[in-house]
Image: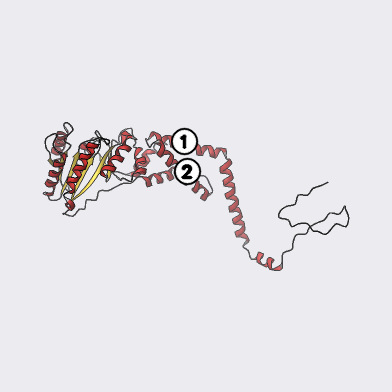
Amino acid sequence: MIFFKKHKRLPPPSKTPATSKHEVTTTTPPISSKEDNVLASKQPVTTAKQDHRLQFKKFAFKWKRKFSTKASYEQANFYDNLEELLIEADVGGKETLKLIERLRTVVTATERDRNEFLSETEKIALFKTLLSECVKTGQLKLAFHEARTPVIVLLGVNGAGKTTTLAKLAALFKDDYKIVIGACDTFRAAAIEQLTHWADLLGVSIVKKNEGADSAAVAYDTIESTLAQKKGFAFIDTAGRLHNKETLMNELQKLFRVLAKFGDRVSVLKLLVVDVTLGQNVLAQISTFHEKIHIDGMILTKLDTQARGGSILALSQALAIPIYYYTFGEDLTALEPFDKASYIDALFSDL
């Protein structure tokens, strides 16, 4: 006995019985009406072919992406190399995985739209765009009217380079403003002497008291002296303090309460000086400072060392704090506005 498998698209066989038991019953497909033929003739055949080819191309690409061993290996190899690079740059494991997952999503969507695989160069370009969206930069706007005197307060932990960075900022603006430095680091040994040396070298004014004096009182006198100047600009140095020391953070809050008493006569910018060589350790520091003080921006120091400051990427994803400047040496001119394009390019120098 022979079984015939009926195709789903064919109409059912005719119910008319065969005249002979050796006779095979045949089925004739339905003939379309004249009206259907007229409608069919009006369809754009060329467009249908193009659409058919496009659908086939999409299917073929999807099939190739799923079963191409070479393509899969190259994809995995690229992401493995990228992950290793980000970990070595101190981005951190958790943030690295987040960034790579975002890149995979963008790459997959782009390849699906183009119906072709992206080259390694194209993937890096997409990743740089993602990083550029993460990193926020800031620019000093010092077009203050005469009723508002600019004040920059530098914050940070011990050894971050606050005092030297303050001297570099003063050197940058001393030709256009009457600079007044406030030596509010009254705790560290020789801090006042160091700042006095920089003030003498730059030829600018300095307000200071004896070691152990109330730093908030020094800050108050600094603002009073700056307000007496025409086109004055105050730079306040603070003592390095650990972010997990509650008493030290309270003293810092006291200093800002004193500055708040001057109201609209001053415009205060709180910049945190960040040592990029500390890697992932800076995340807890900056988070605590930002929570207690509400930081306006950051200055990155020691970017001329082996560390490439990848932790800044993790920080930028967690907190939207702009980066204003970076330093790269001990010279007074070794301070530049932060350029995120150059920074991101440096991360990929070994890829």
The CA span between labels 2 and 1 is: 12 Å
Give percent across and percent down for residue 82: 44, 37
At a point 57% along the width and 38% down the height, the residue shown is 69
Q: Earlier in the sequence, mark 2 or mark 1?
A: 1
Q: Which of the 4 image quadrants contains residue 162?
A: top left
Q: In what element is the residue under mark 1? A: helix
Numbered mark located on residue 104 in the image: 2
Give, as a three-letter code, the residue at label 2: Arg
Give percent across and percent down for residue 305: 31, 33
Which residue is more in the foreground, 8 or 161?
8
The quarter of the picture where the C terminus appears is top left
Residue at the outermost top position:
189
- Seen in the image, is 93 located left or right of residue 53? left
Numbered mark located on residue 80 in the image: 1
Which coloring applies here?
Answer: secondary structure
Q: Residues within 10 Å of mark 1 (few under 14, many from 20)?
A: few
Above or below, 43 against 73 in this view is below
Residue 325 appears in the figure: no
Residue 130 appears in the figure: yes
Q: Which of the 4 image quadrants contains residue 256?
A: top left
